[in-house]
């Protein structure tokens, strides 16, 4: 038993990932490779998001519950950067909207400068109010004109039509900017104020996105977003791809007649195209995640990283040594939020559609935090492992629940009220699974499956 424990302690990281890989292979062989790759891709995006939260919580002890707001900013960036511009809407109210936004920004800057220079407060307030009224007038007029342009399909300004990869960078910068603004206000206060502020700001961001139709169509969603990989239909029409699929399935196809062969090959090509596109996304997401891991590990093992962890472990001692606690917390908060913003942009790119109502606290806050806690707070590889486990359970809990009910049905008489109760609520078992996993980890392994290394010493 001691030898087993020693082997586990030495090799628990590779063993954990190997087990997770075998589980995903089981799904591919027994369900479908498209499903397995879909779980992998969403797990990779969740891992990037969990990595950002782990940097904030595991490195500095910052409690961020506004994850969905930063992820939404990343999603908005994909629309504003990669989507093609709507020229009719721009001609109708684009210039008025630009003028209103510039005038509003100038009003804010002038108000701040006048206040800092000690100008009469009533005069400053009057200037700000007049600037707001002018801004509001042009803004409302421009928004109305833009939203009237073919609202069933467009009704918004669109984007700049730039490569979608550029939107990932912009998404990270947008989230970083929002984090800097929140951090400048709240990081000097107690930790609970940061949690309240991040939650409040994330709700404000979502409120604006859902109600300003001229920006990203509001609740009408934006679909047909460009993607960095090939389309399934194009792959199905590609001759070289058809030849590869035919060669892979040559043994089965040779047993069929010409008519059956053509029909069967079409099915094979269609399924293979889906797998190929998902594999392309997998390779892309793996590269991005690997880059973030390398950079975060380099930062963690640098003098800067050791300083940040020292502040987390004992702020009083670090402050007594002359360390600027607020500045270090702000840096960590901005970096972690930027990574969450990139993950949000990747998610919208992968889905190909921007749906504001999909940004629910259960998915973008609770699940991400469970991933970090389950994998191991302060351990980057632990966060990645937690992302894979939790997302796998989130997707597969429905089929697992149905299987459980079917097994119980073999031993319980048909028509039993308890069995019918479970059948009607089988899809809610995912919440039971999530809560059970979290309770078990907190009870038997508070540090997570892969705890932070320095905490094990």
Image (cartoon, grey):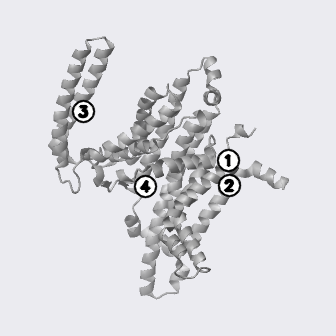
* Pick the front one: 241 or 47: 47
The residue at which mark 4 appears reads as 350
Left or right? Give the position of 118 relative to 16.
left
> Which quadrant is the N terminus positioned in?
bottom right
Left or right? Give the position of 167 relative to 247.
left
Q: CA distance from mark 3 to mark 1?
A: 48 Å
**Category of crowding for the residue at label 2, using alpha-carbon neighbours closer than 10 angstroms: few (below 14), some (14–19), many (at least 20):** some
**Category of crowding for the residue at label 4, using alpha-carbon neighbours closer than 10 angstroms: few (below 14), some (14–19), many (at least 20):** many
Q: CA distance from mark 2 to mark 4?
A: 27 Å
Tell me which numbered mark, 4 or 3, is placed earlier along the sequence.
3
Q: CA distance from mark 4 to mark 1?
A: 29 Å
* Pick the front one: 6 or 287: 6
Badge 3 vs badge 2, beta-carbon distance below 8 Å: no
Whether residue 51 is visible, yes or no, is yes
Left or right? Give the position of 55 relative to 175.
right
Up-down: is 258 above or below 136?
below
The residue at which mark 3 appears reads as 101
Disc 4 versus disc 3: nearer the observer? 3
Q: Which mark is residue 450?
A: 1
Which SS class for mark 4?
A: helix
The x and y percentages for residue 428 are 50, 63
Which SS class for mark 2?
A: helix
> Which quadrant is the C terminus positioned in?
top right
Q: Which mark is residue 16?
A: 2
Disc 2 versus disc 4: nearer the observer? 2
* Pick the front one: 28 or 46: 46
């Amino acid at each position: 038993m001691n030898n087993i424990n020693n082997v586990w302690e030495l090799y628990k990281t590779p063993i954990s990932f190997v087990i997770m890989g075998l589980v995903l292979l089981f799904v591919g062989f027994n369900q479908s490779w498209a499903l397995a790759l879909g779980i992998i891709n969403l797990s990779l995006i969740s891992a990037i998001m969990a990595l950002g939260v782990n940097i904030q919580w595991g490195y500095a002890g910052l409690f961020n519950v506004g994850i969905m707001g930063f992820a939404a900013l990343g999603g908005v960036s994909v629309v504003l950067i990669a989507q093609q511009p709507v020229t009719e809407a721009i001609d109708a109210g684009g210039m008025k909207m630009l003028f209103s936004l510039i005038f509003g920004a100038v009003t804010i800057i002038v108000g701040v400068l006048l206040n800092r220079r000690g100008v009469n407060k009533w005069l400053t307030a009057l200037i700000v109010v007049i600037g707001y009224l002018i801004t509001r007038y042009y803004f409302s007029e421009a928004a109305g004109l833009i939203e009237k342009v073919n609202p069933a399909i467009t009704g918004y300004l669109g984007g700049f039509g730039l490569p979608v990869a550029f939107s990932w960078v912009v998404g990270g910068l947008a989230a970083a900017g929002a984090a800097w603004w929140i951090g400048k206000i709240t990081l000097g206060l107690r930790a609970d104020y940061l949690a309240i502020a991040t939650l409040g700001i994330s709700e404000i961001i979502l409120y604006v996105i859902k109600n300003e139709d001229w920006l990203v169509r509001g609740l009408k969603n934006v679909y047909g977003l460009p993607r960095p990989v090939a389309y399934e239909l194009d792959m199905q029409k590609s001759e070289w791809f058809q030849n590869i699929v035919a060669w892979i399935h040559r043994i089965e196809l040779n047993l069929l007649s010409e008519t059956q062969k053509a029909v069967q090959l079409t099915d094979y090509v269609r399924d293979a195209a889906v797998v190929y596109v998902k594999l392309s996304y997998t390779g892309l997401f793996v590269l991005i995640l690997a880059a973030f891991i390398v950079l975060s590990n380099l930062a963690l093992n640098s003098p800067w990283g050791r300083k940040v962890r020292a502040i987390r472990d004992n702020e009083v001692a670090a402050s007594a040594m002359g360390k600027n606690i607020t500045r270090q917390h702000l840096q960590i908060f901005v970096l972690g939020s930027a990574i969450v913003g990139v993950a949000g942009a990747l998610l919208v790119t992968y889905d190909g559609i921007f749906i504001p109502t999909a940004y629910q606290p259960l998915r973008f806050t609770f699940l991400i935090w469970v991933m970090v806690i389950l994998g191991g707070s302060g351990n980057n590889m632990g966060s990645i492992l937690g992302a894979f486990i939790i997302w796998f359970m989130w997707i597969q809990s429905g089929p697992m629940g149905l299987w459980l009910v079917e097994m119980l049905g073999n031993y319980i008489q048909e028509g039993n009220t308890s069995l019918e109760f479970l059948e009607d609520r089988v899809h809610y078992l995912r919440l039971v699974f999530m809560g059970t996993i979290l309770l078990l980890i907190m009870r038997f392994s508070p540090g997570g499956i892969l705890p932070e290394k320095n905490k094990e010493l």
